[in-house]
Amino acid sequence: MDLSPSHVLHGALDAALDGDVYVTRDVKLVLSSLGGVEVFFPILEQAGLPLKQREAYCITGPSGPKANDLFWNTESEAITYLLKLLASMLVNAPINEQVFYTVKGPATIGALLQKVPPSLLTVAAHSAIQSLVQQLTLSSDQSEQHIELYSSLLFNYRIWSRADYSVQLSHSKYLSTLVKEKLEDCRRDFGVQYFLDVIREYYNPSSVINPKLSTEEKYHIRRSLMSIVDLYLEEYVCSDELDAILGFLCAVNDEILLDEMLKYLLGLLTTPNYQNMISAALWEKGVVFLVRIQAQDLDVRLATIKLLALLSRMQGHNSNGLLHKLMHSGALSTALCLMHQQQLSSSIILALLDLCIVKNNVDCTDYISNFVAYAGTLQLLRHAPLFVRHTSCLELQSLLDTNPEHALKMAQINGWERILLWLLTPPQAENHWQLSCAHRSHPSHKAMLGRHGEEDPSAELFSASPDTLCIGPDSGPVSGVYVGSSPASNPNAGPGAILRGNDDPLDSEKEIFKMCSVVVETIELILWNSTDPMEADGYLRRGWSQFFLMVDIFEREHSLVVPVHTIKQKLFTLLLKDVRKHCSSGNMLNSVVLQLIQLFEAFVIATYPSLDVEEDLEVTLLRFSHNPTFQLHKEHCTHELMQLFVDTLKATHILDRHPQVPEEFQIIQSYLRILMACTNSSQSQYNNFCLNILQLGWVPEEDVRFIFLNLAKELSEGSKNDQSNKIDYISTTMRCLLTIYAEPLNLQTFLPNLPSTVSQSFSTELLDFSKTQEWKMWLEMLQVKQMLHHEVLGKWLKDLSVQTKKCMQICSQVEVDRKEEVVKDLELYENNVLQKYNSLRDSEMTRHRTLEIQRKDELSAALQRWSCTRRFLTGECGAWKNRDPDLYLWKMDRTENFSRMRLKLARNYNYNKHTDASQRRSGETPLLANTADTSLLAMATATKSSSEEEEEHLFDQIQKLARDEPAVAQEKDKKEKLVKRETCQLVTVVEVISGTLDITNKCIYFVSDPQDKDAIPWYPTDFTIGLDLIRELHLRRYKTRRTALEMFLLDQTNYFLNFSTKKILNKVCNCIVSLNNPNLNIFSTQEPAKLMQSSGLTQKWVKREITNLDYIMQLNTISGRTYNDLNQYPIFPWILRDYSSDTLDLSKPEVFRDLSKPMGIQNPDLEEKIKTKYEEFEDPVMGKFHYGTHYSNATTVMHYLVRLEPFTSLQIKLQCGMFDHPDRQFFSIPNAWRITYLGSDVKELIPEFFCLPDFLRNINGYDLGVTQSKIVVGDVILPKWASSPEDFIRQHREALESEFVSAHLNEWIDLIFGYKQTGPEAEKAMNVFNKYSYQENVDLHNIEDEKIRRKLECLINNFGQTPTRLFSEKHPTRLQQSPVRPIKTGTGVFGGKSQALRPTAIWRPEDLCTSYAEVAAAPVVFLGTPSRQTKALLTSNETLVTVTALGVANVHVWLPYSNGKQSHPFTLQPDLNPSKCPCLGGPFDKDLHISSHLFALSSNKLLLSAGHWDNSFRTYSLEKNKMVARTTHHTAVVTCMAVDRLGTEDLLITGSKDTTCVIWKFSKHDPPSRPQQTLYGHDAEVLCVDISSELDLAISGAKNGTCLVHTIRSGQLVHKLRPKKSCEIRHVAVSSTGVMVVYSVGLQSTAAAAVVPCLHLYSINGRLLEEKSLNVPLSTIVVEDKWIITGSEKGFLSFVDLFSLNRQVQLSLTAPICSFFMVRDHQSKVCTHLLVGLKDGKIAILYPKDSIQAPP
């Protein structure tokens, strides 16, 4: 304040404020302008770097210490501090939080945390992560964001598995707490399957992922994780969760994990709440148990068997379940049979017994539920110690006693005899059996005695000095086994409980005795109880006889612990007792007794001939029957056994009476023969048995004679050998015989001198009398009479031999049946168990691999996103810009415009300068040997393809699918599910990537194989496509086979997929069409020629509705030419022949090439030479051809595009690692034409010659060498008439669209795509190439040898491929040029049919007419019409929206044609009613100038306004006449906005004072609500923006004079343009051809007053093309076609040439211009009217003079 007296006296007390203005802003808001919290992520990345690298990474300011020194003072807590900082920046900062989720911030943090040292993952860092997640989840209620946080941070074990044990355990406990709080949410996204995968991958005991963790620590973490699983399963179990557990059991190989999971599942089964549901599911899906029962680990097997046993004991099990059927059909027994190869233990046998035996609920008795499995268990006992066999057979005895019907079921098992006989073999090696965990108890007294409670008569055989057998402990306790009590004392003891005893071991000999006794008793039980003794006739022959024979056979094959006769003695003992028992009850048949006695006779008489000898058996039997001898087998027949036999026969009471039936006679005869053997025995204890029967007195005469003869024979032998004891016994017997049977024998007549039987010396007298002639004659007489008895004996022996043979045959057949049954069971096991198990395992492994690939892809995507973000942050526009930015070169971008032209370059950070390729280059040319045998070509042409008919059939199917709209399409809006999966190849210009294509009802996914993930550094190997984004499907050929599919999307991208067969291709195509995508044009799947006809493109071109360039490109597309396959690259013609003139005069025909002739005969001098060569030369395999090379192949494309990647690398690869020789490089356009003209080449051109100037520049600075003419090969040498590559492209494009080319282009089409391609017309036109370049001449499907096919494919690729022929007749010519020139840029093959020709308002701007209409009382700062109006133009009014400087919007009736009442070609009815004019919200920011930048009009009739004080932009519905949304995302006032005018997507871009730009997307009729991308990089307020989805480009200008170019889809900064210093950017605009226009003015300051307004012209790739200073400031700029239309504040509307910036036309209007809009035809997009908003409230309507006065 000036307080000087002179000043105060004048009464002036004014003051002046001096100083700088400082504004304090919230750091969170500032952060949102710099890039969000991602600005801090580089610090997180530094945590994993060594100190020296970190210092190089640190931020340095202008002066002073490093900014992050304080941060690194506490090394171990670095992560903790940073995470807390991130949390503080995100909490209560909705914009930062929204951007954080939009840019996948959680995934980036998770990816970076995986790279930090494990030592930094402390408990504090873990707590910081918890806090961060908790705060973010509380501030957001969107479940998708919660899932992203959880999956990236908390549930990301790629992070936490690297931490210390304490941190990992703490993390598991925290997850448990989190799951309790959000059980259902976590169960849905991180359920049982997730934690099982974590255990399997990170805490597998055999895993090396966590080497720092001990086995015990891993165990504790597994327990902690399984406790979380318990939380999920606490109330109910889902089928998916059971499937996860079963899948885990299928896929895991670690025995510890298997054991733990089986026991866990066993615990679930014991839980009452789960039993029914789990058991039902396991019965149906538990095939895995039949495989895991064979596990190497005993604990795993034991747990599996226990689980199956528990399942079997459960009530209500599903008998129809697959597992139940398999267990009872032989699969389980096969699994048990396979266990012979593995170690066993008593615990395993115990569990198997529990599995096969269950309790009867009625009488609480045990019974065998699965006899097949029980038999399999008994088979395993062959490897068991003797005591295990003993106790197992004791239990079997108990079961057979309790359930007699079990014997029949056991006997029905093939080979049951062998199963039990194996128990009598010596135990296997000790290492095959793991001894039981508990000592055995002493057997009960019942086990010490026989089964009948009597002392075993064969005990003497086993009485020997005992040897102690020490039994060692098992490896570990058996869970749940009762130990220490006998079965009697433990009522709950189940089968095998005796194995659980704990007493001292028995002696080994007693062990053998016990075991053999029990086994034989068990056999006898089965033999006896398997048939009814009252119906035993015939069965004994098949059963008992068969078994006795089986014992002999088995004994010959295997060694037994006891002799075979001992087994038979024990068995006869038991059988005789059973016979005696049944005789006492009167229920025994004579046939049973007879057959048993006959078996016994054959066993005890040793002198019978062997009956199993095949040779001369009948002679031997006959000889024996005529002179039989009977001797006891001393080892076979003990006195006790013989006594039991006699007592049993007495019990039958057959000896008490005279025989009545033949069986009784046979019994007596057999008995007598046995007695004779006893009589003949040298042991006196057997001699008394014969007197028993002789004293009966009723023995038949012939049997008495038989006895007498045998006694006489023995008496004679005894006298010879002087055997006094034998003589005394025989004498006594003969005395009895002669006393009782003297009369029947008529002894007084035949032996009158026979000594008296009452004599005291009868023995001596008889011996002397036996030597007399009387005695001998009498014996001879008896011998003759005894022949009948001999015949009976012979017949019985013969019958016995026949029966023996039958039994042997039965045994053999049983063995064959058993083996066949084993094979059958093995097949059943393989087909129904192993295959299903392998299927489940493969499915689980595939799921796990897919999940692992998905995780790796997510990590790779996160790191790739972070790499792009880091490049920006460290680049020239980033917050870390003081660091040197990453270097990069340029590569071809895949983005196409609507004309399918590739205009853009992209930054290539993975670049290679290829200096090694330059160094390796020399004067010599590497040879490309072509050693393929030409005979292979003949093989490929044996049969022509019928693809046209197949494609027509496919198209019919697709049309039917489109009409029917199948059920698959109805599922589109439901939950996403897989519809089809096929393996295929993604064909790219660089590499062919193998992978899997998944088609769901919502999207299409391609996942490359792991080995191809990094095949191409600059090309994405995976992709995801929404079904509604697919515009067209085109069937393609790949390597001459029509097995490929090319998908074109709405965003101008495309993908080329190749399948193994055409059948698969058709299935995939049908599947995609059946999903009923509304944007898909099904006609694109037609055969190319028919597709060309139905598209109507030819008619549009003839009528000049589309350009020549668009038409040629569409012909290439339909014929199968694609950017994705170098061998089928699009073909464009050479247009000009004048490359030497200073100027190009397109009005002269001589500057053009002759389009009616191929390139090979452009020189008339060559025509006759080529014709003569064709007529005189014919290759025997190749046939006739005019040219040995082709006009299009991969080499041609690489030749032209060598200066751009990836074509640079491709050519180097082709040239064996070096650049091609400089003289062969494409270094000059005039030289290229000269070579072609001279006949050395026949190459045509590629699309880049008409759209991409940068391919003519060596922008990457490759060393391409020096030609022999000393020309440095760098930028391509241009024609003289071209001043720059851009100028060449422009003039070349004009030449393509010239009148001469339009008139003759049809002739070139006939050569390439038409009727002159093949046949006689091709010969006339001299247009015949190698016949194998024509697809109809090649069918590689006929070649089965893969190597030969590959050689042939390479051969064809070297020659090139001719496009598919589209026209069979002459192509029509184009109409002549007319004054009206509507040009339509195509968006695809099917762009819709145009209506009548409409005038183009800007074709001749000097002829425009002007009309004025008053629409408001204030300046019209914005005006426009929605780009999508109603379809019924004749019945509905369109709208024209105007906005004044006061913020008042008016909606007027507008028609782009006259309604008949006006003389001008439009209808406008202004709406001047103030009450109907809404005011656009609250006040605008006071610092803003109200202009057209603040308003936008969407295609769905939504008006948007910016500049509001609350930092929002607002959306108004023109139909509802009200505001429908207020959207706030920027942290400062929104200063500008723009919509995508010509794109296929409804996109909006907004710019703000906060220096950011945001891209939004409209959805149907809804206003934009969520940002798609946030664009950073400006340092000052953004003043203007423009957007083009067609080019994937967004451009923005700022107040500090910088202009940034970003991509839309990825949000990456591509270019930074700086037109001039001390200026601000007022307007930016981008054309469809990729030219960017920037308008700059000087800053509003004195120092910058000298900066005049200027127009700057940039290429799409950031190159400054032109700039022009202006005298008058501009208020509006629009780019259209070849014009820049500008409006000035002085009322001038100017048309400026887009390439030279020269003003061509200037129109003067009545008032200063405030806004401008171009009205387009909704069908053709042609400009019909120009609308200009004026400052006086009027609008000027400009239209051509010759406009149509009526509606179309």
Image: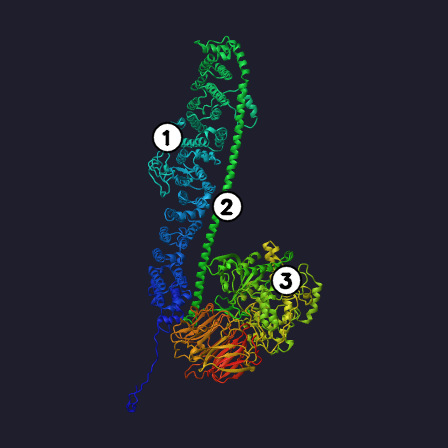
- Would residue 1271 be found to the left or right of residue 322 on screen? right
Classify mark 2: residues with Cα within 10 Å, few (<14), some (14-19) or many (20+).
Answer: few
The chosen color scheme is: rainbow
Asked which quadrant contains residue 104, the reply is bottom left
Q: Secondary structure at mark 1?
A: helix
Percent from the top left, x then y, of residue 611? 53, 27
Nearest the eye: 321 or 1168: 321
Task: Give me the C-alpha separation between circle 2 and circle 1.
Answer: 47 Å
What's under tag 1, amino acid-wise? Met
What's under tag 2, amino acid-wise? Asn
Do tag 1 and tag 3 residues touch (Cβ < 8 Å)? no
Q: Secondary structure at mark 2?
A: helix
What's under tag 3, amino acid-wise? Tyr
Percent from the top left, x then y, of residue 360? 39, 39
Nearest the eye: 285 or 264: 285
Percent from the top left, x then y, of residue 1028? 50, 64
Circle 2 or circle 1, nearest the eye: 2
Choose the circle earlier in sequence order: 1 or 3: 1
Do tag 3 and tag 2 residues touch (Cβ < 8 Å)? no
Is residue 1584 in sight in this rendering? no
Q: Secondary structure at mark 3?
A: loop
498, above or below 1584, in the image: above
Residue behind mark 2: 831
Q: How many marks?
A: 3
Classify mark 3: residues with Cα within 10 Å, few (<14), some (14-19) or many (20+).
Answer: many
Percent from the top left, x then y, of residue 1168? 70, 69
Residue behind mark 1: 448
264, above or below 1134, in the image: above
Residue behind mark 3: 1334
Circle 3 or circle 2, nearest the eye: 2
